[in-house]
Image: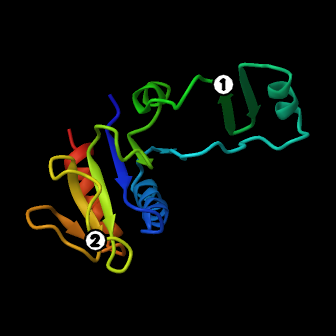
Amino acid sequence: MIPVISIVGYANSGKTTLIVKLIRELKDRGYRVAAIKHHHRDVEMDIPGKDTWKHAEAGADTVVLACPGKLGIIEKIAGDPQLDEIIRKITGADLIITEGFKRENKPKIEVLRQGVHMTPVSSREELLAVAGDVRIEGIPGFDSDDIKGLADFLVQKLLTE
C-alpha cells in the first residue's frame, strides 16, 4: 500500500504552494510522488474542440490520451469520487500527496496561517503535523519555508521501512 498524506486547510492558506515545493524536494531525493487534487465543483480537464473532448462528448465513458512520456485518463463516474477508489488506481509511486480531501480519514498536514485561518479543520487525531506560522501544542510544526525539514519528517514517518 502506498502511503498517503493529505495537505489540508482553508482557501488561500498556501496548500498548493506547499505541495509543489514538497513534491520538488521529494523528487530531488529520488522518490516517486503522485498528487491528487480534489475540487469542490466541476472542472473541464479536456480542451473543447480537441479529439479527446469530442470522444467524451460523443459519450465515451473513459477517454485516454497517450503520448510519449504521458498518459491521461478521464473517466466518467457517478457522484464525487472517493479517495480510496482513486488511490487504488495509482501505481508506481512511493508517496501520494492529496489536496482538498479534508474529510477523508488519512493522516493530515494542515496549513495554518495568521490572518488567514488559525483554527484547524482537522481533529488532533488526524493531524500528523501543521505547516505555516501557527502552532498547536503537542503537534509537530514546520514553517512553510522549511520544506527540507517537512520532507525529512515525512520520510521518517511514512517512507522509512
Q: Which residue is drawn at 20% across and 68% down?
A: 141
Q: Where is residue 143 in the image (x, y as percent from the top left)?
A: 29, 74
Q: Residue at x 80, y 27 (%)?
A: 56
- Residue at the limit of the structure toward the right, as seen here: 49
- Residue at the limit of the structure toward the left, as seen here: 138
Residue 87 occupies which quadrant of the picture? top left
Residue 158 occupies which quadrant of the picture? top left
Q: Are marks 1 and 2 in contact (CB under 8 Å)?
A: no
User: Disc number at residue 76?
Assistant: 1
Q: Is residue 43 left or right of residue 21?
A: right
**Residue 85, above or below 107:** above
The amino acid type of the residue labelled 1 equals Lys
Nearest-to-viewer mark from 1 and 2: 2
Q: Is residue 79 left or right of residue 32?
A: right
Q: In the image shown, does 1 or 40 lie closer to the viewer?
A: 40
Q: Which residue is drawn at 20% across and 50% down?
A: 123
Q: Which of marks 1 and 2 is nearer the N terminus?
A: 1
Task: Tell me if mark 2 has few (under 14), some (14-19) or many (20+) residues whose alpha carbon lies within 10 angstroms of its own.
Answer: some
Distance of label 1 from label 2 (alpha carbons): 37 Å
User: Disc number at residue 118?
Assistant: 2
SS assignment at label 2: loop
**Residue 86, above or below 40:** above
